[in-house]
Image: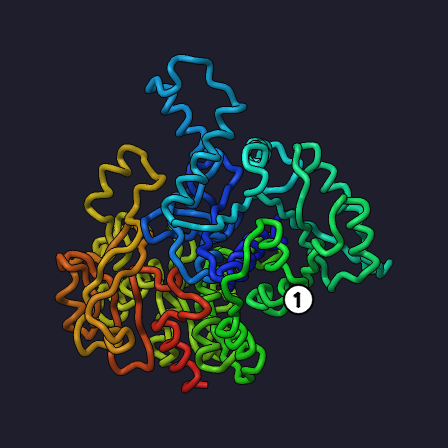
């Protein structure tokens, strides 16, 4: 089932094999007809993660980057839609020589071709492929078929790892293996026998359960890997190594360990466990609630970047999820107890006014505030209204009839929207930004020029640049051609910075992003 941690498992296995001296990369396969993740609702699918080369992907690509410490590219991501699109386009161009094109073998062959392209691009010695969805679902049959075909052609080069859940019913108190037994049988029906089973459960597996899985799932007992719930996902590579997963994988591939070095990783994980100070961070967003539940995955990169910044400062984050409809009902009183506030990404008009109210409160109360993309845009609107006196100021995205659209559509986007082309057409990927010397953000980065990732269709309206600068808004980051405002801040405030880019995409456990480190440091001082 979803949410068990396939992406984290892939990232963890990748980290283990990387620590053994191998070049490792990962591919994510999403069984959706969507060509990419860009048009998916974050409340259904979680965060959209943007790669350095501008691909809108599933959030698991972000997990891979945070664990492996390397960029993952658009070639490492595919969906059912993108595979079919490629095959259909080739057929239209007579790429199949006029023969009948069939789901099998042509679709699985395209999947295999894409995997091999990713291997070539990344120069990976070991490539880990995550097949999204659940075994037995109609959606991922073609990907399982591709996996079966790869193993048939190169059995010595392909291993299968299955992640399965072992429930412990509260009223029974005994761990049950039957769901895993059934899942393996379903996988067998697709022509695949797992080499390893990662046994997800609330607690560690005991010998009895391992033996049972071994007997009924036709697998060596040593290849049943315990994967209990842990406090931090960054514990997982260390936990897998307790069952010698790295050694077992290399042995099956007939490879030798070039080294064995998880020391830096273990040092940071130990720091996580020993940090005692707490800092309260509020996220004011509109993609939290799904019925009665909180969906933090909508902002997973922001959350992980905050954690990285906290652990560097030897403290633990205490998150407060502040939904915009909550501000509508209760006002800004929930912000009073916070040490810092983040206004993250978003789209559309819903919740915008509530974000603006929160920003005003934080600016006037001196609460450290970091605005990201849409969050920065709402900072600009708030400043225009309450400092510059432009009472009807707004974003064109929120109110197209506003007389003062301080945030407006990027000019190149106008004809794109008129043609109804939404997917993959916004400003995406890494772009250069020139930082203004002497500003807070330039001091944080310790450099004048940076490259950060973007995902937006609207921008600061330069028509209002002069009046805002006169009133104290500092334009601290601009594009090299000086047309696009990339970052803003105000002086005489503990921390009030907004970025049009997404610094959270580049934060990694061993390399925390400087902006989040600096933000948390100021929040601690307030604390």
Q: Nearer the viewer, residue 138 or 410?
A: 138
Q: Quadrant of residue 492?
A: bottom left
Image vertical order of residue 208 relative to residue 523, above or below: above
Decide if residue 168 is on the left or right side of residue 245.
right
Question: How packed is label 1: few (under 14 Cα within 10 Å), some, or many (20 or more)?
Answer: few
Total numbered labels: 1
Residue sticking out furthest to the right: 172
Q: Closest to the observer: 256 or 118? A: 256
Which residue is drawn at the image coordinates 53% and 81% (left, top)? 278
Q: Residue at x 40, y 23 (%)?
A: 88
Rendering coords of residue 126 (x, y %): 49, 50
Q: Secondary structure at mark 1?
A: helix
Q: Is residue 521 above or below residue 139?
A: below
What residue is at 63 percent from the left and 48 percent from the top? 161
Position of residue 36 in the picture relative to residue 415 (left or right): right
Quadrant of the image occupied by residue 425: top left
- In the image, what residue occupies the spot 55% across and 67% down? 234
The residue tagged 1 is: 242
Is there any visible trace of residue 324 in the rendered image?
A: no
Residue 449 location in percent, x, y? 20, 66
One can see residue 4 in this view: yes
Nearest the viewer among 447 and 379 is 447
Instruction: Name the spot of residue 334 as percent of width and height, x first.
Output: 50, 73
Q: Position of residue 123 (x, y in %)?
A: 39, 49
């Amino acid at each position: 089932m979803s949410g068990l941690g396939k992406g984290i498992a892939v990232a963890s296995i990748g980290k283990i094999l990387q620590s053994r001296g191998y070049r490792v990369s990962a591919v994510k396969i999403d069984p959706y007809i969507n060509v990419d993740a860009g048009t998916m609702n974050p409340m259904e699918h979680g965060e959209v993660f943007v790669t350095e080369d501008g691909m809108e992907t599933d959030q698991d690509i972000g997990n891979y980057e945070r664990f492996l410490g390397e960029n993952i590219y658009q070639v490492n991501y595919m969906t059912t839609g993108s595979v079919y699109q490629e095959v259909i386009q080739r057929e239209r161009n007579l790429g199949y020589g006029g023969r009948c094109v069939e789901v099998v073998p042509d679709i699985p062959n395209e999947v295999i071709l894409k995997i091999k392209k990713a291997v070539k691009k990344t120069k990976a010695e070991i490539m880990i492929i995550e097949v999204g969805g659940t075994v037995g679902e109609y959606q991922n049959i073609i990907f399982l078929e591709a996996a079966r075909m790869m193993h048939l052609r190169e059995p010595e080069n392909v291993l299968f790892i299955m992640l399965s859940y072992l429930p412990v019913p509260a009223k029974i108190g005994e761990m049950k293996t039957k769901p895993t037994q059934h899942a393996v049988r379903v996988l067998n029906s697709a022509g695949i026998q797992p080499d390893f089973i990662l046994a997800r459960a609330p607690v560690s597996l005991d010998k009895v359960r391992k033996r049972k899985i071994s007997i009924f799932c036709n697998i060596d007992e040593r290849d049943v890997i315990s994967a209990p719930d842990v406090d931090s996902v960054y514990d997982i590579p260390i936990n897998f190594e307790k069952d010698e997963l790295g050694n077992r994988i290399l042995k099956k591939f007939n490879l030798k360990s070039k080294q064995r070095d998880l020391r830096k990783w273990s040092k940071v994980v130990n720091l996580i466990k020993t940090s005692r100070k707490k800092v309260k961070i509020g996220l004011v967003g509109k993609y939290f609630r799904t019925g009665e539940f909180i969906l933090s995955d909508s902002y997973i990169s922001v959350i992980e970047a905050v954690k990285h910044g906290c652990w560097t400062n030897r403290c633990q984050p205490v998150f407060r999820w502040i939904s915009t409809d909550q501000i509508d009902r209760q006002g800004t009183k929930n912000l009073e107890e916070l040490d810092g506030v983040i206004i993250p990404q978003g789209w559309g008009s819903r919740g915008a006014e509530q974000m603006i109210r929160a920003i005003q409160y934080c600016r006037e109360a001196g609460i450290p505030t970091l605005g990201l993309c849409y969050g920065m845009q709402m900072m600009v609107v708030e400043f225009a209204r309450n400092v510059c006196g432009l009472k009807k100021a707004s974003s064109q995205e929120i109110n197209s009839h506003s007389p003062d659209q301080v945030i407006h559509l990027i000019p190149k986007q106008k004809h794109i929207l008129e043609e109804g082309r939404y997917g993959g057409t916004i400003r995406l990927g890494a772009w250069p930004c020139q930082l203004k010397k002497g500003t807070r953000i330039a001091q944080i980065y310790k450099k004048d020029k940076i490259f950060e990732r973007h995902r937006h269709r609207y921008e600061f309206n330069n028509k209002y640049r002069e009046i805002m600068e006169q009133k104290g808004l500092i334009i601290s980051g601009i594009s090299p051609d000086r047309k696009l405002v990339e970052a803003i801040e105000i002086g005489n405030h503990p921390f009030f910075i907004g970025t049009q880019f997404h610094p959270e995409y580049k934060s990694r456990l061993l390399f925390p992003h400087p902006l989040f480190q600096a933000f948390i440091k100021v929040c601690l001082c307030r604390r």
